[in-house]
Image: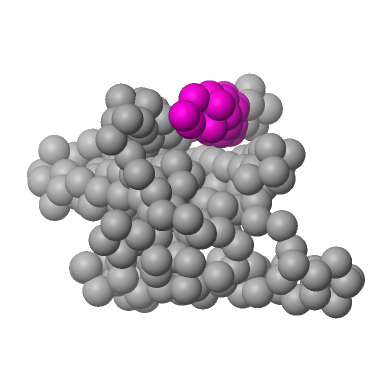
């Protein structure tokens, strides 16, 4: 029933995953001394920027982004402004949450905020692309039995995998292994990215395997 949407989802996720790969490989070829560890913030913003640009383009081209009810320029600008505002507020929210979980408040503020930007690019941005700047729709999707489409289910899986990956990535930090990837916030951002990539693979696979059991309410 949803074979076409699942194929579109798999193709979309493959393109986004390729953007993460290119955001890691291209700077290494163009920037002298680039590495995920030594120039971590550069890699982090490279991945965030690539995922942001590619996600917006792909979701818009495939028509997954919800259409605007009004076609006036003012309404479209208002929608764009709210999307940017939600993106920024999400960065502040993740920053606050990470600090509450034990990240340095002042000493590594830029590193912590950069991690928040990455988490926002991997989670909130997808909500904006699929659902638009509609907080009520976000609450519905992440509530119990709130999914109304395969893309809603995809959001649940990819966001959960990303956040779990970031959380698991924090475990090695206090260990005295003295590894370069234990420097804040390298392991968390790597964990979030690996979790995100895992979600990109797991979402269409899980939906395809359970497609006969999935039932969605009408919007």
In-image side of 162 versus 41 (left or right): left
Q: State which quadrant residue 12 falls in.
A: top right
Give 31 or 114, whichever is nearer the viewer. Answer: 114
- Up the image or down, 175 lies above or below 91; here it is above
Query: Compared with residue 175, is residue 34 higher up or lower down, i.e. above or below?
Result: above
Vertical placement of residue 124 versus 133, above or below: above
**Residue 38 in the image: x percent, y percent?**
44, 39
- 91 or 178, which lies in front? 91
| Residue 13, magenta (yes or no) | yes
- Most frequent secondary structure within the magenta stretch: helix
Q: Residue furthest right?
A: 73
Which picture quadrant has residue 154? Answer: top left
Report the residue at 88% width, 72% height from top. Answer: 72
Q: What residue is rendered at 31% in x and 70% in y?
A: 97
Q: Is residue 27 visible?
A: yes
Q: Residue at x 55, y 70 (%)?
A: 134
Query: Which of these two is toward me, 56 or 109?
Result: 56
Viewed as shown, does residue 219 lie left or right of 202?
right
Q: Is residue 111 visible?
A: no
Q: Residue at x 33, y 39 (%)?
A: 214
Which quadrant of the view contains residue 83?
A: bottom right
Q: Which residues are magenta?
A: 1-25
Percent position (x, y) of residue 15? 59, 28
User: In the drawing, does residue 40 fall left or right of residue 199?
Assistant: right
In the displayed orientation, state which residue is furthest to the left. Answer: 176
Q: Position of residue 62 (x, y in %)?
A: 68, 37
- Is residue 198 in the magenta section? no
């Amino acid at each position: 029933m949803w074979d076409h949407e699942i194929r579109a989802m798999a193709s979309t996720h493959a393109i986004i995953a390729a953007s993460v790969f290119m955001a890691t490989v291209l700077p290494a070829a163009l920037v002298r001394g680039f590495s995920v560890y030594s120039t971590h913030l550069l890699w982090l913003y490279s991945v965030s920027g690539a995922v942001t640009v590619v996600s917006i383009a792909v979701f818009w081209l495939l028509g997954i982004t919800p259409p605007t009810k009004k076609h006036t320029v003012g309404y479209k600008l208002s929608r764009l402004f709210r999307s940017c505002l939600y993106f920024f507020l999400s960065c502040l929210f993740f920053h606050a949450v990470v600090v509450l979980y034990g990240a340095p408040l002042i000493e590594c503020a830029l590193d912590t905020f950069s991690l928040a930007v990455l988490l926002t690019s991997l989670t909130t941005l997808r909500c904006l692309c699929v659902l638009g700047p509609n907080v009520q729709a976000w609450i519905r999707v992440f509530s119990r039995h709130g999914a109304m489409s395969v893309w809603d289910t995809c959001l649940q899986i990819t966001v959960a995998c990303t956040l779990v990956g970031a959380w698991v990535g924090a475990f090695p930090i206090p260990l005295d292994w003295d590894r370069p990837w234990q420097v804040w916030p390298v392991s968390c951002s790597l964990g979030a990215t690996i979790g995100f990539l895992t979600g990109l693979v797991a979402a269409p696979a899980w939906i395809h395997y359970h497609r006969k059991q999935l039932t969605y309410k009408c919007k």
